[in-house]
Each structure stands twice: as C-alpha cells, then as structure tokens.
Image: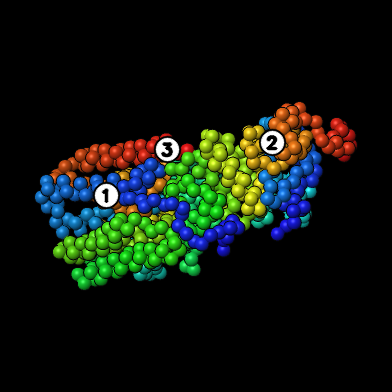
C-alpha cells in the first residue's frame, strides 16, 4: 500500500469563486490513509464547497490536487469515484422503499450470467461488509430502509461508501440529526474506517465529536486556512478560537492583497 | 466484481438473525409502508364468497370464463399503470392510446386490395406506434419536467380526437383478421389447458426452488419455509383449478393465458432486472437514484413507453372481443377502471411501492363486482358507486400505511 508519508489526498492552493463571492482562497488540505481528518469551520467557511470540489461536483478555479502522490484532474463525480473517493452526504441519499441490500448496490447491481440481478451474492456481500464494520444493530439486511433508525441509516450510507474499494471517504455532518446513542454508534464506525486503512474526512459542527474521533483538525474561516491542529496537542478552546477569530495562516503574497494585479 | 473492506471472515449469515416468524415479517412490511397483496386477496375471496352465496348463476364455469375475458383489457392497461405509479407518476392517456392501437391495427388489416400487412404485422406495428407515443409523452415529463398529469391529460384529449377523426365519419371498422380476433376469442382444448397449467406450475416451482438453492449456496438466510411451502402448493393448485373450471365450460380462454404470460414477464422485469430495480429507486427517491448514477430520465421515458405498449395490448384485445373498433373505443370507464385496478391491487399512488400482480388482483375485484351486480340487474350507477367506495377504501389503506411509515422512520 501507500507509504505513510504520502497523503492519500493533497490539495495545494485551491481557490474557487462563485461570481464575485470568493468561497475558497488559496486553501491547502491533506488527509493520510488510516487517519480521520476533521474539517471544521463556521457556516460559510467553505467546508461544503471544498468537499464538493473534491467530489467533482464543482471545478476549482485554481490549485493542484494530488491523489496518492500523483497529480490528478477531477472533472466530475465519476472521476472521483474512479479514484476511490466516496462522499456520504448529509441528506443520506438512500431510497426508503428499498431494503438494505438494494440500497448498498444501487446503481452498481451484481448480475448473473443471464443478466439477472444476483440477489444472493449481493445479500451475502452486504452482510459481510456490515459485519466487517461491526454494524450489528440491523436485524435483517432485507429490511426496508424506512424501518431503520437514523443511526442505522447513517451506518448503511457509510457502509455503502466503503464497499467499493474506496480509499477516501468524506462524511458530511454524519451525526447532525442523531441522538446520543446513535451518534456514538456512528462515531465508532468512523474510527473503524480509519483502522481499516481508509482516509476519512469528517465534517462536523460538533467539537465533542471531532475531539473523540479526529486525528487532525483543519480549520477554515471565510474560505481560508486558519489552522491545522493535532488532536492530542490542542484544546477545544484553541479550535473554537480559530473557528471564530482565526487569522489566515498563510499569507499568499499576491492574491491576499486586495486589488493587486494578478 | 466487488470486494468488501479488507478483513472479511468466512461467508456467514448476518450476526444474530433471529428466526423471523410469518407474523413479524408482515408486520415489518406494514411498518415499512408496504401492505402487500394481502388486503386485496382477502377482499377478493370475501367478495366471491358473498356473491356465490347470494347470486344465482354467478358461481358457474360459464360465468368464470366470462369474468376472465371481461377483465383482460383492464388488466393489460393496469400492468402499465403499475409501472407508472411505481415512478410516482400518472398516465391519463392510456384509455385512448388503447383505442389508437385498436384503430391502427384495424386499419392495417383491412382487406382492401393492397395487402401489405398480413398475419401478426398489424398487431406488431400498432404496438410499436403506441409505445413510441408513450415514450414521446414520457420525454416531456423526463426531459422538460412537465407534470405527467398535464402531459397525459393533453394526450387523453388529443388521442380521443384522433380516434374520432378516424372513425367519426366512417363509422366502426370491422376486424376480419383472425390473428387479431383470436387474441380475445380463442379457447384452448381441454388437454392444451392442462398442459399450460403444468408448464406454469413447473416454471414457478422450478424458479422458486432454484432461487432457494442459490441462497443456500451463498449462506444467505432463506425465506420463511412455511410461507414458501404455502406458495409452492398454492400456485399449482390455482393453475390447475382455473383450468379445471374453464374446461367445464368452453376451455381455457386465451385471454387468461395472455394475462398470466404478461404477469410473469413484467414481474420478472420488475424484480429480477436492473431496470426494474431502478424503477423502484426512482419512485422511492429520485435524488438518491441520480446520485447513485442512475439515468433517471431514461428510466422515466421507458416506463411511459411500457405504459403505452400495454395500453396497446389491452386495446387490441378489447377490439378483438367485439371484432371491431367503434368511435367510442377507449371511452367510458376504461381509464378509471385500469388505474383503480392497480391501486386497489395494492400499488401505492405515492411511488416506489407496489407489485405487478396488483394489476391482475385489482382488475379481478373490479370485474367480479361489475359482473355480479350486472347479473343481479343493478344499474351501472350502482356499479360505479360500489367501485368508487372500494377505490376510496384502498387509497385510504395506502395512505394510512404511509403515515405509519413516516412515524416509524428514523
């Protein structure tokens, strides 16, 4: 596998504007395999824009992107998926009327030689994946997703993301709508992903969650990097300070100066 | 083709799957907003029992055959309706699309000198025409986003107009092609009927056992064995029972075989193919389907083409029953009967929930009631009111099931 010093994903000097609004300005970001990188920031800090750029939904205006050390170009969601980048969106994107197996394989169904859906194989694989992630609260993989609790649904969405040989999983506020016990369930799952060698990006507003599972913490403010902390060497106060009033850590000569010719 | 996360133990069943009892499974389904076919099957048995006890000349082989032929047209249209409803859309044009298919087939089979289209070709071409019309209407829904209600309401008016232009002045067209007329009027001999029952039973039993063996091989939990056994016995009993009753009269009507053939085909499409899976997904959550990489527009267009195609099949059978197409073809209650059949059969109006078989079950309910009330010399008014009440009841059940699901979710 990759050696530990090469980040799974590395972004350098990313900028993105929507019309006159500068959503991201010269942002650096990296995540290594086997680590949970927390991405935090207040509303409008540019977190969502950043992950949408990584997922191929938006294109960067400027900047470079390296995947496992190689420069890559992501111009659509398919490119991202091909690299092994999976995003679990906040609003889940599961079909309530389908069961767990059907959701896990949605859009990538397994077939037998006669082009029929191969249910036993899909069911077996789903059960294995859930087992390897130790998701044990789902009674039957043939249950409709509508009958699952919020935590169980989030677990299914995460399991779906890791089933496809993915190398980087991005979780957008996975615990936002969950109760205490269910949050714990999902956070345990997040840790397990990293233990299995995946690179994990966790976006959250909840500092408690971040300090529980994050290995490193990237803080954005107003579309700029304002801090990169290691969990063991920082405090919640320091991170809150950075989120609310952090100064840009990187003064990039030209673009930071207002009105300067580019 | 796929590989799961690194560590994967020997293939084993899910951790701690408690043996599901029959009752809990149905209860889980109801909680999930899926009532299944149970209400309509119980209702149908009740309706037949009541009429059998109270109505003379109802529970006879002759009348059994009559009901089968009377329900075929509605059933064919309702198969298409099931797919459209699974998407959460509606198709109001089907009744007059069925008339268009009848008119096209009748025009093409006319023995007026230039015999270009003979044999089965008028049927094939008519079906292609209506399938394309369906796809055309569907593309307004899928590509532009016009509500299907409006698109197909426009279709309802326009195709009615077309039929009137074709037949208004000229009057009905008589159909002489045996290829067309036999689709509704042919009866199998006794032995052919038994053979058909045997083939259908063998297909069903073989298919179920094969699936079970496959599941066992992959160490996946098999369905409840008691329920499975009931199904394995019930379907052959039903097949042979139907043939037995039909043989006491004129024999198995071809219309019955056509319904079963399309039932098997569309159930296969809905349950065993990727396309079918994607129809359910788009109906359940279009955004999730899109993010999963499904071409939502393509699915929608194909479903409307299926709807048009099945309307055509029904239209040709309805025309064949009378050996003619008349200007009032496709009018009356055909549209509402077909949609009601799918809904009464248990397919949800809200998309994503339903079974192909609900078309046949719902059509059986509607046709049986209409037939029995007609025998008892009630007027059409009474028949309409009764059907309306049953429809309201079915939709209420569906809505309640959905509300329950909204409560149990998350």
- Exactly how many numbered labels are in the figure? 3
Q: Is residue B3 visible?
A: yes
Q: In this view of the protein, which residue sits in the foreground, B175 or B389?
A: B389
Disc 1 from disc 3: Cα separation:
26 Å
Q: Is residue A27 above or below residue B172?
A: above
> Mark 3 — residue?
B408
Q: Position of residue B207 (x, y in %)?
A: 36, 65
Q: Position of residue B5 (x, y in %)?
A: 59, 56
Asked if labels 3 and 1 touch by Cβ distance under 8 angstroms, the answer is: no
Q: Which residue sits furthest left?
A: B56
Q: Position of residue A208 (x, y in %)?
A: 63, 34
| Chain to which mark 1 belongs | B
- Residue at disc 3, secondary structure: helix
**B197 horizontally vs B135: left or right:** left
**B353 horizontally vs A254: left or right:** left
* Disc nearest the viewer among 1 and 2: 2
> Mark 1 — residue?
B41
Q: Which residue sits furthest front?
A: A232
**A78 horizontally vs B113: left or right:** right
> Mark 2 — residue?
A40
Quarter of the image with the N terminus of chain B in it: bottom right
| Chain to which mark 2 belongs | A
């Amino acid at each position: 596998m990759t050696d530990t010093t090469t980040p799974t994903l590395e972004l350098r000097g990313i900028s993105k504007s929507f019309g006159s609004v500068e959503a991201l300005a010269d942002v650096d970001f990296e995540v290594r395999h086997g680590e949970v990188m927390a991405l935090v920031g207040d509303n409008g800090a540019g977190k969502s824009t950043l992950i949408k750029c990584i997922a191929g939904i938006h294109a960067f205006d400027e900047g470079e992107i390296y995947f496992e050390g190689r420069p890559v170009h992501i111009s659509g969601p398919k490119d991202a998926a091909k690299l092994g980048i999976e995003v679990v969106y906040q609003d889940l994107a599961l079909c309530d009327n389908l069961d767990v197996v059907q959701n896990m394989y949605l859009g990538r169904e397994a077939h037998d030689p006669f082009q029929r859906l191969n249910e036993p194989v899909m069911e077996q694989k789903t059960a294995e994946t859930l087992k390897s992630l130790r998701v044990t609260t789902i009674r039957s993989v043939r249950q409709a997703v509508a009958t699952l609790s919020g935590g169980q649904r989030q677990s299914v969405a995460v399991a779906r993301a890791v089933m496809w040989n993915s190398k980087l999983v991005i979780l957008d506020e996975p615990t936002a709508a969950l109760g205490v016990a269910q949050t714990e369930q999902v956070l345990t799952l997040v840790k397990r992903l990293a233990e299995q060698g995946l690179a994990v990006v966790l976006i959250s507003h909840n500092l408690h969650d971040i300090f529980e599972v994050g290995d490193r913490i990237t803080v954005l403010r107003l579309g700029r990097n304002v801090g990169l902390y290691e969990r063991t060497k920082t405090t919640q106060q320091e991170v809150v300070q950075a989120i609310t009033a952090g100064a840009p850590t990187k003064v990039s000569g030209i673009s930071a100066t207002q009105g300067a010719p580019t | 083709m796929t590989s799961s996360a690194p560590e994967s133990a020997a293939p084993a069943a899910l951790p701690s799957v408690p043996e599901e009892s029959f009752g809990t499974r149905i209860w889980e389904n109801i909680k999930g907003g899926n009532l299944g076919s149970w209400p309509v099957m119980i209702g149908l048995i009740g309706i037949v029992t009541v009429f059998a006890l109270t109505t003379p000349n109802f529970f006879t082989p002759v009348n059994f055959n009559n009901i089968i032929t009377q329900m075929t047209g509605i059933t064919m249209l309702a198969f298409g309706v099931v797919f459209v409803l699974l998407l959460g859309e509606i198709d109001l044009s089907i009744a007059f699309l069925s008339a268009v298919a009848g008119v096209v087939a009748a025009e093409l089979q006319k023995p007026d000198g230039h015999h270009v289209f003979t044999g089965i070709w008028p049927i094939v071409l008519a079906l292609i025409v209506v399938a394309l019309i369906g796809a055309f209407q569907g593309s307004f829904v899928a590509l532009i986003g016009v509500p299907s209600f409006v698109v197909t309401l426009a279709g309802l008016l326009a195709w009615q107009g077309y039929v009137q232009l074709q037949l208004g002045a000229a009057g009905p067209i008589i159909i002489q092609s045996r290829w067309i007329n036999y689709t509704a009027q042919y009866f199998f001999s006794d032995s052919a009927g038994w053979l058909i029952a045997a083939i259908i039973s063998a297909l069903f039993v073989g298919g179920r056992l094969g699936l079970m063996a496959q599941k066992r091989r992959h160490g996946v939990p098999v369905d409840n064995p008691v329920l499975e056994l009931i199904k394995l016995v019930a379907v052959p009993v039903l097949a042979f029972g139907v043939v037995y009753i039909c043989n006491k009269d004129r024999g198995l009507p071809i219309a019955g075989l056509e319904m079963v053939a399309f039932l098997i085909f569309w159930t296969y499409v809905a349950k065993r193919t990727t396309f079918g899976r994607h129809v359910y997904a788009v109906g359940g959550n279009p955004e999730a389907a899109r993010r999963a990489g499904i071409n939502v527009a393509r699915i929608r267009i194909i479903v409307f083409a299926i709807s048009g195609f099945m309307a055509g099949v029904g239209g040709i059978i309805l025309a064949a029953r009378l050996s003619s197409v008349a200007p009032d073809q496709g009018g009356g209650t055909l549209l509402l009967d077909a949609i009601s059949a799918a809904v009464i059969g248990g397919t949800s109006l809200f998309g994503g929930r339903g079974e192909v078989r609900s078309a046949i079950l719902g059509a059986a309910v509607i046709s049986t009631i209409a037939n029995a009330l007609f025998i008892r010399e009630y007027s059409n008014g009474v028949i309409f009111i009764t059907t309306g009440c049953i429809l309201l009841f079915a939709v209420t059940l569906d809505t309640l099931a959905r509300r329950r699901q909204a409560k149990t979710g998350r």
